[in-house]
Amino acid sequence: MLRATNIDSLSRETFDVLVLGAGINGAVSAAALAAKGAKVALIDRGDFAGFTSQESSNLAWGGIKYMESFELWLVRKLCKSRNLLLRSYPSSVREIRFYTAHERGFRHGLFKLFLGTWLYWIIGSFFTRIPRLLSRRVMAREEPLINLDGCDGGIEYSDAYLVDNDARFVWGFVRAALDRGARAANYVESLGARREGGAWVTRARDVLSGRELAIRSRVLVNACGPFVDAHNALTGQRTGHRHIFSKGIHLIVDRLTPSRRVLTFFADDGRLFFVIPMGPRTCVGTTDTRVESPRAEVTPEDRRFVLSNINKRLALPRPLTEADIIAERCGVRPLAVRDGGGGEDWLQLSRKHAIEIDRTERHVSIFGGKLTDCINVGEEICAAAEELGVALPRPGERWYGEPGEEVRRAFLERARALDLDALAPPRATEKLSERLWRRYGAHALGMLEEIRRDRRMADALIEGVDDLRCEVAHAARTEMIAKLEDFLRRRTRIALLLRREELARSPGLREACRILFGDEADQRLAEYFEQPGERAPAEGAAPVAAPPVE
Ligand SMILES: Cc1cc2nc3c(=O)[nH]c(=O)nc-3n(C[C@H](O)[C@H](O)[C@H](O)COP(=O)(O)OP(=O)(O)OC[C@H]3O[C@@H](n4cnc5c(N)ncnc54)[C@H](O)[C@@H]3O)c2cc1C
């Protein structure tokens, strides 16, 4: 309903700015512009955060690895961005310790690395906990999972991570843009745009219905991530930057260690390699391979690389095999290079973003970037829009961050009165009140009211995950779920926590589908299981059949 209303408005109204692409860069652009008073539209040809921004390592980090290439200014900038996220999102972006094993003979000695973490901590304004030098004895006691063969000690330092998933974080900005009057729609593709009478007319197509529409805007922001160059070719934009692509994959397996730390190693190719907590699971990766196309897939070699590195560095009761993989993630990092560049040392290529403004055509392109730096991107896009003549009547308006302490207190008081935490499913890994606040902020107050009226709204619906009936109902009403994957993979991370076979057997999923799609439940469910999953079934396994919705 919300989507249909928004698509209608897209073709009827003229916007100050049309943002193309709703990954992190497009979502923050829309949220910032809408809060500051611009009339904004946002479209994506897939789901919100359905491309690169759902494939990250979920870290908000100050770029410790750029210390090695002495890009200290970039490190300072990223540390400031990380600190701002930590301050602004105290429940959804949290500090986490990185526990790093050091192998004898590595290109930098242990003590030098330890000094590096101190410098990193100082550059980061002492914002996090202090780094520690670890002896083998301490490591054996604190993280017995680490294989200490060939290791002469380690270091522990802090960075931050997104407690839910990256795509949910992006959705928060889309939601904020919508709350401030922006018109946003997923599954609407730009087919190209041209200037007409001093404005942009973008020819777009509703991917789900096939209907074409024209969207008029004064300014066009190209936030198509890895497809920025392709879209610029459609509009005839010439830019000084272009993208090259680095593929990265992650494998998700059962939880490997009870500790809430990121275990860090240097992989066989010398790059940092992580074992990252992901609720009841562990996410392992990543890789860094230059590829030509943005549409990358996990290859058997990728899987072998990650599994062999992890098996070498952890003292597991038995080595991990492909059968242990619950889900996979694969994406390309769009790296901004100056035209003619890209021949530099691949692994040393930095991940700075670049924004190019075409003043004559009133067009903006966003190249590269990181989730970590998203607030800066939002601010820079507002400055660019102003430069192109868009009036921002509320220039100082705060457009990011969790709701204030007063709202949180009101929520917690009502949650206590309802004895909400006692309603959490027995296997829940955290307090229900914490989880609902983090995921929905002020919108969680409405859920409390629903639970007060009907306790069944607090039932966990899908076997093996914590999501409640009232959360599914909320998603159905307000989170623009067009396909089941939008819900399972991006508004929640259920598809990363459960195997497809488990989902296919779940009666709870069928009920969720009825809530999400009403009469179309059967069709959406069948569609989901017809698509190849992100984790193809192991060889010889039976194909996953779509369960009927009774
Ligand atoms: C493996 C990996 C690990 C990473 N880890 C981290 C990390 O830990 N921390 C961090 O900060 N960053 C990390 N990053 C980087 C970060 O994820 C990306 O830089 C960021 O998500 C890119 O966002 P984006 O908005 O530019 O692109 P995208 O998220 O790809 O968004 C672009 C959108 O444009 C849409 N689009 C394209 N063409 C059209 C069209 N014609 N019409 C309409 N829409 C269109 C696409 O569908 C897409 O949704 C990682 C990246 C990878 C690949």
Image: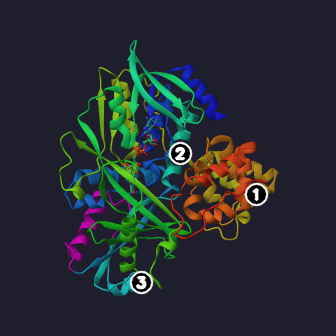
The quarter of the rendered structure image containing the N terminus is top right
**Marks 1 and 2, Cα distance to the nearest angstrom?**
28 Å
Residue 124 in the magenta stretch? The answer is yes
Q: Which badge, 3 or 1, comes first in the chain's sequence?
A: 3
The quarter of the rendered structure image containing the C terminus is bottom right
Instruction: Return the x and y of residue 477 as percentages of the image width and height.
Output: 68, 41
Instruction: Report the amino acid beneath label 1.
Output: Leu
Question: Which residue appears at 65% of the width and 66% of the height?
Answer: 464
Question: Which residue appears at 59% of the width and 59% of the height?
Answer: 494
Residue 316 image-quadrant placement: bottom left
Instruction: Return the x and y of residue 116 as percentages of the image width and height.
Output: 24, 66
Instruction: Return the x and y of residue 66 as percentages of the image width and height.
Output: 25, 58
**Mark identifier at residue 171:** 2
Q: Secondary structure at mark 1?
A: loop
* Residue 446 visible to the viewer: no
Viewer-proximal residue, 523 or 487?
523
Instruction: Report the amino acid beneath label 3.
Output: Ala
Instruction: Report the amino acid beneath label 2.
Output: Trp
Span of residues in magenta: 105-131
Disc 2 packing (10 Å; few <14; some 14–19; many ≥20): many
The residue that mark 1 highlights is: 418
Disc 1 packing (10 Å; few <14; some 14–19; many ≥20): some
Question: Which residue appears at 53% of the width and 50% of the height?
Answer: 168
Q: Which badge, 1 or 2, comes first in the chain's sequence?
A: 2
**Marks 3 and 1, Cα distance to the nearest angstrom?**
45 Å
Viewer-proximal residue, 147 or 207?
207
Instruction: Return the x and y of residue 133 as percentages of the image width and height.
Output: 31, 77
For the residue with label 2, is its CB less than 8 Å from the closest atom of ligand 1? Answer: no
The residue that mark 3 highlights is: 315
